[in-house]
Image (tube, grey):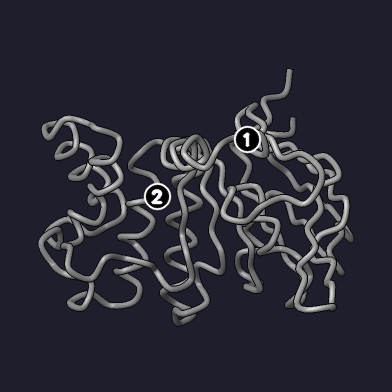
Amino acid sequence: MKDYVIETESLSKIYTTGEIEVQALSAVNLKIQKGEFTAIAGPSGSGKTTFLNLISGLDSINSGIARLAGKDISKMTKKELSDFRRDHIGFIFQAYNLIPVLTAAENIEYIMLLQNISPAERGERTSKVLEDVGLKGKEDRFPSQLSGGQQQRVAIARAIVSNPNIILADEPTANLDSETGSALLDLMHSLNRERGITFIFATHDPKIMDKSDRLIIFKDGKIDSDLIRNSGVHS
């Protein structure tokens, strides 16, 4: 039996500005299995970021169903959705979204504070994940004291430290030079392979598309193509 972490049925979203309606997403049906390394690509306005926002509950669904880890997020209250996101989804953003007054270690620990994890376990997990992302020795640095690539490594560490079911990454390499972006992509690919973490990217980056096990192209709010390449997930 296949273990799906994401299932959508006729997922749709319309944005309204005055009298103008824009169909950002139109009846999208998609299933993503545990452990996939999936890229969602397409031109600007194709619906890929809207799709990520809907399946994570960052934006409201007009119609259709989105299930994460078997739970229908459209039926959750705001509090339930917030708690569910905290415990099941890791986010990596283009702009890093680190808290500037917190150190690298404190940024990583913050999600575990919200989960009421003990100080001892927080410290142990933070130390391990800093080593995993190549930032051992930089735990006391503030974001302003780190390069863009190092800040994104902190963001990756923050995303994985709570052991989420899935990590959603929106243009995670867009603000980085090519070499740094490639190194971080290799890091995320290793985390996917070694820990079985499910990654879904919304991206324009050809390197992410090439590295992905599955490449889904959106066009005009719909899935235009869905290419599954060699992956143990799909065997």
| Residue for badge 1 | 68
Report the residue at 66% width, 64% height from top.
Answer: 49
Give the structural element (helix, strand or loop) at label 2: helix
Give the structural element (helix, strand or loop) at label 1: strand
Q: Quadrant of the C terminus?
A: top right
Q: Depth check: 53 or 104 in front?
A: 53
Report the residue at 88% width, 50% height from top.
Answer: 27
Report the residue at 27% width, 65% height from top.
Answer: 99
Determine whether 136 is above or below 206 in the image: above
Kind of residue at disc 2: Ala
In the rendered structure, the answer to whether residue 9 lies left or right of residue 147 reads: right
Determine whether 196 is above or below 12 in the image: above
| Residue for badge 2 | 159
Q: Residue 57 at what x, y percent from top left? A: 59, 48
Q: Is residue 36 visible?
A: yes
Q: Residue 164 at what x, y percent from top left? A: 45, 38
Contact flag, marks 1 and 2 (Cβ < 8 Å): no
